[in-house]
Amino acid sequence: MGNARRYVMELLASLTAYALVLVAVNKAEQWGWIPDVLLIPAALLPMLPGIATVWVIMRHIRSLDEMQRRMQFEGLAFGFTMTALITFSYGFLEGQGLPRLSMFAVLPLMNVLWVLGYMLACRRYR
């Protein structure tokens, strides 16, 4: 249980850092504290803790046994393919007049579908 607890704590820390940097950059831009020449680099600053999040997830997956990795892989495959299906379908519907959705909707959708796929894989192998 120690590995799982460590993973959750590291994941929460990296996601919290991401949120804090994102809010700080947005507020600094809103208040005019960022010179125009630095707007693009500043907009990308939240990606630094995002990289840390990727590292935390990859390290955790590498620490899993073969069966747990297989279930994670199936969850990821389900999340990836379902996200592609849903976003492409909605893209066709946008062509029919539905409102455009932000690209920021893709990652939360993929994460929810990853968890759903993982739950289905867990159920399959029990």
Image: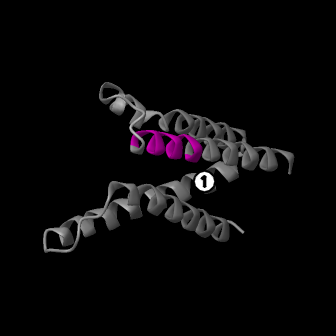
In the image, residue 119 lies at what x, y percent? 62, 67
In the image, residue 82 lies at what x, y percent? 40, 64
Decide which of 118, 53 is in the foreground and name it. 53
Would you say 31 lies left or right of 62 here?
Answer: left
Residue 7 part of the magenta segment: no
Check the image and report above or below for 42 versus 103. Answer: above
In the image, residue 94 lies at what x, y percent? 19, 69
Residues rendered magenta in the picture: 19-29
Residue at image coords 32%, 59%: 102
Would you say 52 lies left or right of 37 here?
Answer: right
Q: What secondary structure is the magenta-colored segment mainly? A: helix
What amino acid is labelled 1 in the image? Gln
**Residue at the outermost left position:** 96
Q: In which quarter of the image is residue 6?
A: top right
Instruction: Say how many tags the image has.
Output: 1
Would you say 16 lies left or right of 91 here?
Answer: right
Residue at image coords 60%, 53%: 72
**Which residue does the numbered mark 1 point to in the structure image?**
72
Residue at image coords 72%, 39%: 63
